[in-house]
DNA sequence: AACGGAACCTGAAAGC
DNA sequence: TGCTTTCAGGTTCCGT
């Protein structure tokens, strides 16, 4: 269930593994990852991967024939690097075998819930083109955040998770950042003060960088990975004391997603 | 137009 | 023990 930091780690890994490599084999299973736009696996063979980019939660791999691979990890997608003769992974949905500097490797896309996407297209997808400010790619400060929010009146938590406003912020990053900025998640987005815009922009960077530091590595770890302790400051910590003021953190549901907040700090 | 709720999937964990 | 319910960090669609 990746948000910006997990997708950023994936992009960095894919640059190491795939940039400059040539696709020598492609196996794309019949499943809903390619829903709406079936991919001709054979057409990928012989193509070189020129670059790997990320915006928000999307990955874009530019090929040498002017097409692009768009990959979204949905709720449970991951890209792994394996040997070409390694066995198929559990929930493996597709694979790209690469040759790079005379060495072969195999990229496996694993996604048990299949909310992810894999699209090959000449033109950018609308979902890519309409993405809002990416905190890492574009930078984000109080002024640009305020401009992106505009006069939206929905709650600030829902607006933050709108990918056309700030790209890459999901339920965890929104929850963590709002706590850091001491803003109640239900606050109407249009009612934030300039001071709060600045605090929230800084809090988003803080949360993303903090999560990135936790997750840098060859394979993404998620909170729910067996045995992994919850590394977040407030997300999933309802019932525990607020790290700032010791008030018991509470969980509410907002826009259908669970949200944790401190009733004292985020008044 | 805006909003809540359900749907799309699978599986782990909690509840009974 | 084993069956049932709940929940999950994403996105989209549908009815009000």
Image: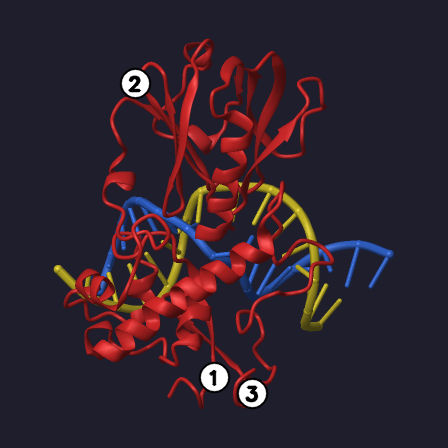
Chain colours: A red, B yellow, C blue
**What is the crowding at mark 3: few (fewer than 14 residues within 10 Å), some, or many (at least 20)?**
some
- Residue mark closest to the camera, 2 vs 3: 2
Q: Residue furthest front?
A: A101
Residues under labels 3 and 1: Cα distance?
A: 7 Å
Which chain does the residue under circle 1 lie in?
Answer: A
From the image, state whether disc 1 or disc 2 is nearer to you. Answer: 2
Residue at image location 55% in from the left, 17% down from the top: A98
Relative depth, front residue between B6 and A51: A51
Where A128 sits versus B6, above or below? above
Q: Which mark is residue A215?
A: none
- Asked if badge 1 and badge 2 are on a common chain, one would say yes
Q: Which comes sooner in the sequence, label 2 or label 3?
A: 2
Q: Which of the chains bears the disc numbered 2?
A: A
Contact (CB < 8 A) between labels 2 and 3?
Answer: no
Q: Residue at x 61, y 82 (%)?
A: A240
Residue A121 position (above or below residue A70): above
Please tell me if label 3 and label 1 are on a single chain. yes
Marking on residue A66: 2
**Above or below: residue A161 compared with residue A179:** above
Residue A78 sits in which quadrant? top right
Name the quadrant of the C terminus of chain A: bottom left
- The residue labelled by disc 3 is A248
Of A52 and A162, which appears nearest the observer? A52
Indicate the position of residue A236 as horizontal and vertical percent values. 57, 70
Query: SS for tag 1?
Result: loop
| Residue A192 can be seen, yes or no | no
Sequence-wise first label, 1 or 2 = 2
Residue at 24% x, 69% y is A154
**Mark 2 surroundings within 10 Å by alpha-carbon count, few (fewer than 14), some (14 through 19), many (20 or more):** few
Give the residue number, with chain letter if any, for mark 1.
A262
């Amino acid at each position: 269930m990746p948000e910006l930091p997990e997708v950023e780690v994936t992009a960095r890994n894919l640059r190491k593994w795939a940039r400059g490599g040539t696709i020598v084999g492609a196996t794309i299973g019949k499943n809903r990852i390619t829903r709406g736009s079936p991919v001709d696996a054979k057409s990928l063979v012989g193509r070189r991967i020129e670059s790997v980019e990320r915006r928000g939660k999307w990955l874009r791999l530019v090929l040498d024939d002017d097409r692009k691979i768009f990959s979204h990890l949905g709720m449970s997608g991951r890209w792994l690097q394996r040997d070409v003769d390694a066995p198929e992974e559990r929930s493996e949905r597709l694979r790209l075998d690469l040759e790079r500097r005379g060495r072969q490797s195999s990229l496996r896309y694993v996604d048990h819930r299949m909310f992810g996407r894999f699209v090959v297209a000449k033109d950018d997808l609308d979902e890519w083109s309409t993405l809002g400010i990416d905190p890492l790619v574009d930078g984000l400060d109080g002024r640009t955040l305020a401009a992106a929010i505009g006069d939206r009146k929905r709650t600030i938590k829902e607006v933050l998770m709108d990918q056309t406003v700030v790209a890459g912020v999901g339920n965890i990053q929104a929850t963590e950042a709002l706590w850091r900025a001491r803003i109640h998640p239900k606050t109407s987005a249009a009612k934030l003060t300039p001071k709060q815009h600045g605090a929230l922009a800084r809090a988003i960077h803080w949360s993303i960088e903090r999560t990135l530091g936790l997750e840098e590595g060859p394979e993404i770890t998620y909170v729910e990975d067996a045995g992994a302790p919850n590394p977040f400051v407030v997300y999933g910590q309802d019932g525990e004391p607020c790290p700032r003021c010791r008030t018991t953190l509470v969980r509410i549901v907002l826009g259908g997603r669970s949200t944790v907040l401190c009733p004292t700090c985020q008044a």
